[in-house]
Image: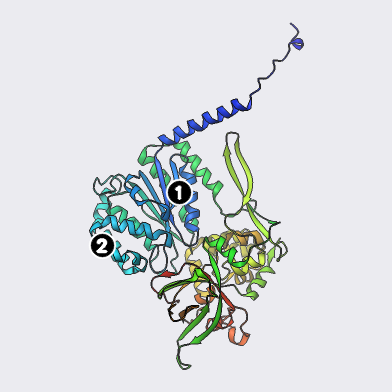
Amino acid sequence: MDKTNIEAKPRRKIGFRQLAKAVEFTVKLMGRALAKRVKCTILYATETGKSEEFAMTLCQIFKYAFHAKVLSMDEYDSNDLEHEALLLIVTSTFGNGDPPENGEVFAKALLAIKDPDNQHKDKGKQTRYKSVRTSSLKNENRSLDMNNKEGNKRDDNVPTNTGLLKNVRYSVFGLGSRAYPNFCAFGHFLDTSLHALGAERILEMGEGDELCGQKESFKIWALDIFKAACDTFGVGDENTVSDAVGSFSQIDLTWSPDKFRLIPSEDMSPDICEGLSKLHGKTVVSCRLIETQQLQSLKSSRQTLLVRLATQGSPKLLYSPGDHLGVFAENSTALVDGILACLHNAPPFDQDVKIEIQSQHRTPLGNIKAWERFPKFPICTVRTALRRYLDITTPPTQRLLKILSTHASDSSDKEALENLANDPQAYENWKHDKYPNLLEVIEEFPSLKIPAVLILTQLPVLQQRYYSISSSPAVYPAEIHATVAVVKTRIQVNLLWIIFQCDIIPPAQGQHPSGHHGWPRYWYCSLQKFLATEENRQGNFTRIT
């Protein structure tokens, strides 16, 4: 038979209705499969958005073996707590050991579950929870630890079979900075409270220090808790764990030259308040500086300032005495200009740009790469990013120094940077002796050629600082007063200056004795306005040191 004469059979055409039915059937199968999976609830509490970012990442990992969902603590119904199979918590700590604002309701609920009788006795005092002192949290944590110390050693890996939450498995990851006291205090409070209520801790609490490899610490904990959860519930296999580990690298925001890019934006950049609101996940409004008043005598070695701010009639700045005011400020123009002059392959400094990250998505056809907007970072110029949004004064972390070492053309610079990145003691000595800002690091290692996109994606965000309000709206209805202690130091840093840099100071007054720009005692006099967050938080006034 002549094969060339064989007519090809026409392909069967699939109509839209048939395709829709197939998709519907697939969705139903997926729904049934998910319904059979163990449910995993991931809760987060955050002030800056970092905990939310980590919680979202954790959810993507757990979807490989669990029916996972993410909720903010203020969205969660605490009545569901005893019905949870697996509960994971990612939280930061606010101020002097208190919960972030969106974690307060959940914290109250835990306290009420632990002591329901006291809940009714102190019903009128519940709204004062956010003024709970760190000492009370620490004492409670210490007593819980004392009571459960031996039990933890014996029973952490088996159900306790006692308590309201006896069927709940959990683990906690706390975010914080060891530059402040009460490191991860709220995370420890949740960890010990859940355990005291009978929940089974399947992995010890993880901690992430903002000053030292926070993302790396989270990555280790996230993979460990995924493996521990799979073992606890008998789900998944080696392939599942391998896929989850692989997905982590896909959603990780760590640096590689081909993962990030800056492109011109057709959209206009938002104003500063809108940009800060987007970056920090909270409403930010502008305040005008009325005046500052020195409260100490000229002979005093101490500096205490009364700062008067005009609310300009903003309804978002209603407050009560003792509340906290979150304040943003900007970096020094001289410092910003110095860094801009050293950037490599940077777009025009005053051109609006947006950051994109290359991500991978798993599909039935395999992995697909696509460029997506870098999460949360607003459209802005490179100059604005350095001046308003990024912390350019805190010494780079070891992780960032490791990245910078790959951009040093001189072998001695490269070797020195790698040594600082890999030797914790050398790094701590270097940071203590010099406490360099980003420009000083570039000057110390002059062969560095740093891409602008590296700076915009890898530097930490410039955080707000909270101050206790010392005025009453009954006496000053359109003003907010803050009393601030300014601490001088001969070390090559002043943390107040890190947060509030200014460039209007005369050089004779503004020169730090260590050579750093700006002597902090003058910073209030030069700021034209503050940017303040809408939430006025109660709590302890923490002196800035």
Q: Nearer the viewer, mark 1 or mark 2?
A: 1
| Front residue (pair 489, 487) | 487
Q: CA distance from mark 1 to mark 2?
A: 31 Å
Q: How many marks?
A: 2
Which residue occupies 54% across, 67% down?
284
> Of helix, strand and loop, which one carries label 1?
strand
Q: Quadrant of the N terminus?
A: top right
**Disc on res. 540:** none
| Front residue (pair 309, 456) | 309
Q: Where's residue 445, x and y in %?
A: 63, 68
| Front residue (pair 499, 243) | 499
The crowd level at tag 1 (other Cα within 10 Å; few <14, some 14-19, many 20+) is many
Residue lying furthest top: 1
Q: In the rendered structure, which amino acid carries the disc numbered 2? A: Ser
Residue 430 visible here: no
Residue 286 visible here: yes
Q: Where's residue 185, x and y in %?
A: 37, 63
Q: Where's residue 341, x and y in %?
A: 70, 69
Please tell me whether residue 371 is drawn above or below residue 415 in the rendered image.
above
**Residue indicated by mark 1:** 70
> Of helix, strand and loop, which one carries label 2?
helix
Which residue occupies 30% across, 65% down?
124
Q: Earlier in the sequence, mark 1 or mark 2?
A: 1
Q: In the figure, is residue 227 to the left or right of 111?
A: right
Q: Do tag 1 and tag 2 residues touch (Cβ < 8 Å)? A: no
Q: In the rendered structure, which amino acid carries the disc numbered 1? A: Val
Residue lying furthest bottom: 299
Question: Which of the 4 image quadrants contains residue 505?
Answer: bottom right
Q: Where's residue 226, x and y in %?
A: 42, 45
**Residue indicated by mark 2:** 143
Q: In the figure, is residue 35 to the left or right of 282?
A: left
Which residue occupies 56% across, 27% down?
22
